Amino acid sequence: MTQPDSPDTLQRQLAEQRYIADDTVATVAFLAIAMRRPLLIEGPAGVGKTELARQLAAACELPLIRLQCYEGLDESKALYEWAYARQLLYIQLLKEKVDALTDGATGLREAIEALARHEDAFFSERFLLHRPLLQALQTPEGAVLLIDEVDKSDPEFEAFLLEFLADFAVTIPELGTVRAATPPVVVLTSNDQRDLSDALKRRCLYLYIDYPAPELEESIIAARVPEAGESLRREAMAFIREVRALDLRKPPGISESIDWVRSLGALKLETLAGPRLRYTLSALLKHHGDLRRAIDALTPAP
Amino acid sequence: MKRLMADFAATLRSAEVPVSTAEVLDAARAVETLDPLQRDLFRITLRATLIKSQRHHAVFERCFALFFDPEGAPAVAIDAPAQAPDDAPPSPPEELERRWRQQEVLSEGADAAEEQLQEALREMLDRGDPRALELIRGLATGALRDVPQEAREGAFTGLLLLGRRLQAARAVGRLREALRRFAEATAAERPALEEDAQRWLAARERRLDEAEALLVDDVRARATRTFTAAERQGLRGRNIVELYLRDRELLVEVMQRFVRKLATVHSRRLRRRRRGQLDIKRTLRASLRTGGAPVRLEHRRPKRRKGDLVILCDVSGSVRAMAQATLAMIHALAGLWDHIRVFAFTDDVEEISERFAHHDPEEVLRWVMEAPLFSAPRPSNYGRAFRRFEQRYGRLLGSRTTLMVLGDARNNGHLTEHHLVEGWQRRARRVLWLNPEPATAWDTGDSEASAYRPFCTEFRACTTLGQLEEFVAQLR
Ligand SMILES: Nc1ncnc2c1ncn2[C@@H]1O[C@H](COP(=O)(O)OP(=O)(O)O)[C@@H](O)[C@H]1O
Ligand SMILES: [Mg+2]
């Protein structure tokens, strides 16, 4: 891994990877890496939370391991699970061997005892499904562990995470304790749908990413869609501002802006003046009513 | 440094921002990781380590400015008479003194200012020289004569001041550590000196405490004064309508907090119930696919009948504020109901469920607080509005429906048509009425509270945020 030596270095490195981080983002991300503290990022959808984790991994030259959270996510999906079906399959295929093992046994108890002596074979790494959290512990050079959208998981899972983050070790009863050789850089994201527990927050550094200021958004677009010329970009930014000023159900976020400007490039439009503008807007607005409204208000009749 | 952080944390806590000791230690550690002389870096670092919710960012910025910015920092008169310390350190054996003088304290690479500071501190420690105390204070507040004039003005002062104060705090910390190490080493080498060394250490530590207190005291005093009882106590006791008229921003902020809290509590409540018992039949059926081995455990999905909610809100004049606040809170609890229908009325009804149902909580809040629910405000006519509601939507009320009316029952002298409410109570599961006026105002002027009240399962006053929160939290 390579560790940035200052927030500035990190900021430059991210910019080279075409991720535009303002001073706050660069500073807090730097601290998270330097102090090896989990980083909790909150903010509305589409402001680049997930992308930041990805780019941090690239900047540190570490693999990215991602755990996407959802309602009902539990340890078996996050940490590890025994490959039950596979174990059964092996038993089926090796039926004769199993029979042979229990051959001399006279009663049920004896048969079980005979089998138990071979339990190790079935509860070994071969039959272990490594889920993201376990993978993050077992990557020798360390990793960036992205725990995406924690707010979607259940409070019980949050409690489990807290434990995991405290010692970066897990105990698998059949195999023993797995401890991280190099603790991962952990990034948690939340769309802020509900409050996370105070205990979890206390363990983390906190970063809130808001919708970007116009200049920042313009640099993001310049970085992400370099093929769009400056004048088109300017025009597009002004247009997006007008769109956002409409009373919309879902105003376009950064990723929509990027997609849209990209589509303008693909259509080889050099200016927004013209009848084709309206056909591009579905990249910007994903809600039918919003699209109608923007077309009516902002585009010339065909 | 830790002391400075702890004091800053105390300021935050006095403004109702929760900060734990672990976080204070984190902040101190983080600051040492970075170049603290860059003011913004310093601010961002403190914020990331001490503040764990965006809702507290505004308060943080206020506290930070108070605590670390120079405006209003009282200039220190360098030549003011300083009090001589009354407990001069006990004269220790010669040997202790001699050893201490040889002790190196300053770290490598310290600049002139730091050296000066360190000198002053040591002076103060060793002789109890009051002038040294003043010097420290001067260094810490940027009021020293040797600070160049141009540096004292403009934005740079803040940086300089901050830097000085941090330097001073660091110097004190370093000295304290050196003292402790020294006392320990001495005791280890010469056990005979142990007791003296302890006493000697204690006296000096007291002096350091004094110096440190000087570094933060006046700023802290200023900061805590700003967040007195006024802000801390009783947002819950504040009158909704008054808040709405006087300080809408604050109301929105508080509502956001309430709404968020409700959403959190509520999501826990729902989750707890989600997983049902093991469903043996389905588990066995599923196991057929895996050769009879129950690879997959199936759970019974708990059936929940949640019921419907119909809300009728008076959006004329003064009721609006309460209606809006209530709607925002109910939205946070939308998951408790199968369907929610919302109707606004003045002298007619209009359904506004659609927007209510689709937006995320923050947006609904903004919408109900800012957008007019009805295009033109008209005086209310409960009788007429109720008639219209009965004609058009009366069929919505069934045995699983809760009907909630938000209104002050001020009817401008029109027909009350309370028999309609009587009928609703019979058909619906219950009728709840929230009145933004205190009970003492009921039936005064054109209020018809008593006409409707007998027909409501519950009819209660809801004037403060606290009452509203309580009501909504119990709603099921
Ligand atoms: N600061 C940024 N610099 C470059 N691209 C960005 C930035 N912020 C957002 N993006 C782009 O926006 C898109 C959405 O970002 P994403 O990380 O998925 O958002 P979030 O996780 O916050 O919902 C990504 O594809 C990314 O390319
Ligand atoms: Mg994301």
Image: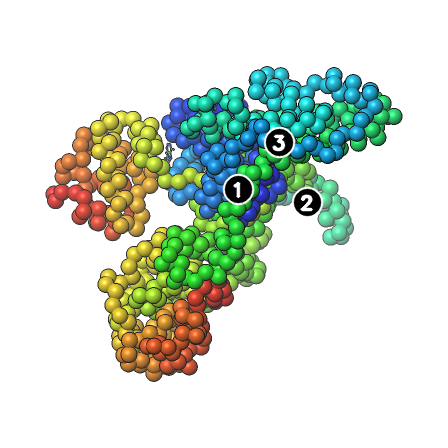
- Can residue A139 be seen here? The reply is no
Q: x, y percentage for residue B263? A: 47, 56
Write down the residue under mark 2: A99
Q: Secondary structure at mark 1?
A: helix
Q: Residue furthest right?
A: B192
Query: In the displayed structure, does residue A251 sit left or right of residue A48?
Result: left
Residue at 72% of width from left, 48% of height from top? A112
Q: Secondary structure at mark 2?
A: helix
Label 1 amino acid? Arg
Write down the residue under mark 3: B81
Label 3 amino acid? Pro
Label 2 amino acid? Asp
Rounded to the nearest angstrom, the CA distance separating label 1 from label 3 is 23 Å
On the same chain, marks 1 and 3? The answer is yes
Q: Is residue B62 above or below residue B137?
A: below
Query: In the displayed structure, does residue A174 sit left or right of residue A217?
Result: right
Residue at 67% of width from left, 37% of height from top? A177
Q: Quadrant of residue B350?
A: bottom left
**Circle 3 chain:** B
Query: In the displayed structure, does residue B195 sit left or right of residue A249?
Result: right
User: Could you classify mark 2 by the number of other residues whose Cα lies within 10 Å: few (under 14), some (14-19), or many (20 or more)?
Assistant: few
Q: Earlier in the sequence, mark 1 or mark 3?
A: 3
Does ligand 2 reach within 8 Å of label 2's beta carbon?
no
Write down the residue under mark 1: B222
Residue at 16% of width from left, 43% of height from top? A299
Q: Secondary structure at mark 3?
A: loop
